Image (cartoon, helix red, strand yellow):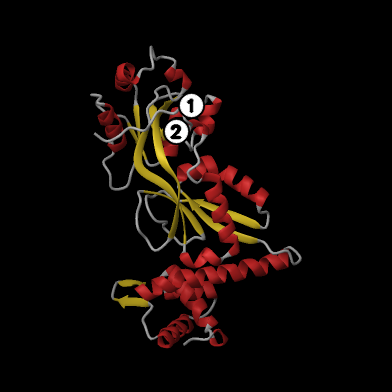
C-alpha cells in the first residue's frame, strides 16, 4: 500500500505534465528539466504502481486506462494546492478557492453573469472560473463542475438534473407584428412557411430534427428542411435579435428576453426535446466543501423550479404521436 509519507511528488508532477501535453518533450519544457529526467520519473512511477500509465507505440502516445484514471486526480490535487498557497500569499492569509466550471455556450452567454454575480454574493470565498464548450454529453476536459446538455444517460459522474429543455418558436417583435393571428392550428403553418427557419446543430442528429419534431407532433405540413444552420443556440438567438427568422429556443434560458419584450413567443406551443441540462461532478468531490456548496446552490437556484414562462398558464408540452 502507498502511504502519503512516501508519495513520489516529483514523479507525479512529471506524470501530470506528460499527461497534459502527451509529450515528454513538452513536459520537460514546462518543468524546465531534461527530457530524460521526466522519462525517469514516469518510469519510476509506473514501477511503483505496477502498471503502465502511457501506451508507447510507433506513431501513437496515449494514456492507458490507469493513466486516464490517475491524471484528473493528480491535476486537481496540484491545482488546489497551488490555489490555496497563492490565496495565502496574495490575500494575507485569507483563503480563496477557485472552481473551474464548464457551461454549454448558450448557457454561458445568457446565464454566466447572473451565476457569477449571485453565487459571489452568497459565497464570496469561492471564485468561479467559467469556460464554455460546444458539445453534447459529458465535458471535454476535467473540471470541478460542469453543466452538460444531454439526454438522460448513465456515467461514473454524479449528475443532478437542473431542468429539461422546453423549446418554443421565438422571434423578434417586428417579425411577430406581421402575424394576422396566433392560433397554432390555423396560423403557425403559414407563419413558418413564410419565415426563415433557424436551426441549432445537435451532435449526431439530422440538422432539421427539432423543427421536424415540432411540426410532426402538431400535425402540420411544413417544409422545415430549409433555412440557416448554426453551431449553437446562442448564434441562432443572436440572428433572431437582428430582426430576422424564427428559432426554437429554450423558455428558461431566454425568460428574461421574453419578459423584456426583446423576444416574442407568438404561439402557445412547447416542445420537449428530450435533452436537459445536468450538473455533473466527480463522486470523490462530494466531500469537497467548496464544490458541495456550489452544487447545492446550483440545484437550489435552477433545479426543476418553473420559471415565470413555465407557470401554470403555460400550455402542456407536445407529446409524441
Q: Are marks 2 and 1 in contact (CB under 8 Å)?
A: yes
Q: Quadrant of residue 70?
A: bottom left
Residue under circle 1? 263
Q: Secondary structure at mark 1?
A: loop
Residue under circle 2? 237
Is residue 22 in view? yes
Q: Residue at x 23, y 24 (%)?
A: 221
Question: In this view of the protein, which residue sits in the foreground, 191 or 235?
Answer: 191
The answer to whether 306 is drawn above or below residue 9 in the figure is above
Q: Secondary structure at mark 2?
A: helix
Q: Looking at the picture, how far across and down is residue 261, in whole percent?
A: 53, 24
Q: How packed is label 1: few (under 14 Cα within 10 Å), some, or many (20 or more)?
A: many
Q: How packed is label 2: few (under 14 Cα within 10 Å), some, or many (20 or more)?
A: many
The answer to whether 271 is drawn above or below residue 19 in the figure is above
Question: In this view of the protein, which residue sits in the foreground, 165 or 91?
Answer: 165
Q: Residue at x 40, y 24 (%)?
A: 268
Q: Looking at the picture, how far across and down is residue 172, in whole percent?
A: 46, 23
Question: In this view of the protein, which residue sits in the foreground, 212 or 241?
Answer: 212
Q: Residue at x 27, y 31 (%)?
A: 217
Label whose residue precedes the other's in the sequence (2 or 1): 2
Amino acid at each position: 500500500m502507498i502511504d502519503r509519507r512516501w508519495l513520489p511528488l516529483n514523479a507525479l508532477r512529471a506524470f501530470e505534465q506528460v499527461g497534459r501535453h502527451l509529450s515528454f518533450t513538452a513536459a520537460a519544457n514546462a518543468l524546465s528539466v531534461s527530457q530524460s529526467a521526466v522519462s525517469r520519473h514516469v518510469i519510476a512511477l509506473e514501477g511503483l504502481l505496477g502498471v503502465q500509465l502511457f501506451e508507447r507505440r510507433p506513431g501513437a502516445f496515449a494514456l492507458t486506462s490507469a493513466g486516464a484514471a490517475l491524471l484528473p486526480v493528480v491535476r486537481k490535487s496540484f491545482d488546489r494546492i497551488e490555489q490555496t498557497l497563492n490565496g495565502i500569499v496574495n490575500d494575507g492569509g485569507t483563503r480563496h478557492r477557485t472552481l473551474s466550471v464548464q457551461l454549454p455556450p448558450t448557457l454561458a452567454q445568457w446565464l454566466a453573469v447572473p451565476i457569477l454575480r449571485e453565487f459571489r454574493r452568497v459565497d464570496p470565498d469561492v471564485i468561479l472560473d467559467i469556460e464554455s464548450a460546444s458539445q453534447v454529453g459529458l465535458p471535454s476536459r476535467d473540471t470541478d463542475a460542469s453543466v452538460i446538455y444531454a439526454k438522460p444517460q448513465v456515467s461514473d459522474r454524479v449528475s443532478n438534473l437542473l431542468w429539461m429543455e422546453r423549446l418554443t418558436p421565438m422571434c423578434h417583435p417586428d417579425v411577430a407584428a406581421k402575424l394576422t393571428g396566433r392560433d397554432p392550428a390555423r396560423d403557425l403553418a403559414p407563419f413558418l412557411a413564410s419565415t426563415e427557419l433557424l436551426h441549432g446543430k445537435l451532435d449526431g442528429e439530422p440538422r432539421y430534427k427539432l423543427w421536424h419534431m415540432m411540426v410532426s407532433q402538431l400535425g402540420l405540413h411544413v417544409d422545415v428542411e430549409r433555412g440557416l444552420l448554426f453551431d449553437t443556440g446562442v448564434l441562432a438567438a443572436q440572428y433572431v435579435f437582428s430582426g430576422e427568422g424564427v428559432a426554437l429556443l429554450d423558455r428558461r434560458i431566454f425568460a428574461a428576453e421574453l419578459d423584456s419584450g426583446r423576444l416574442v413567443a407568438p404561439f402557445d406551443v412547447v416542445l420537449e426535446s428530450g435533452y436537459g441540462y445536468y450538473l455533473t461532478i466527480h463522486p470523490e468531490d462530494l466531500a469537497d466543501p467548496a464544490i458541495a456548496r456550489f452544487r447545492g446552490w446550483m440545484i437550489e437556484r435552477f433545479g426543476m423550479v418553473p420559471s415565470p414562462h413555465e407557470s401554470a398558464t403555460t400550455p402542456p408540452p407536445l407529446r409524441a404521436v
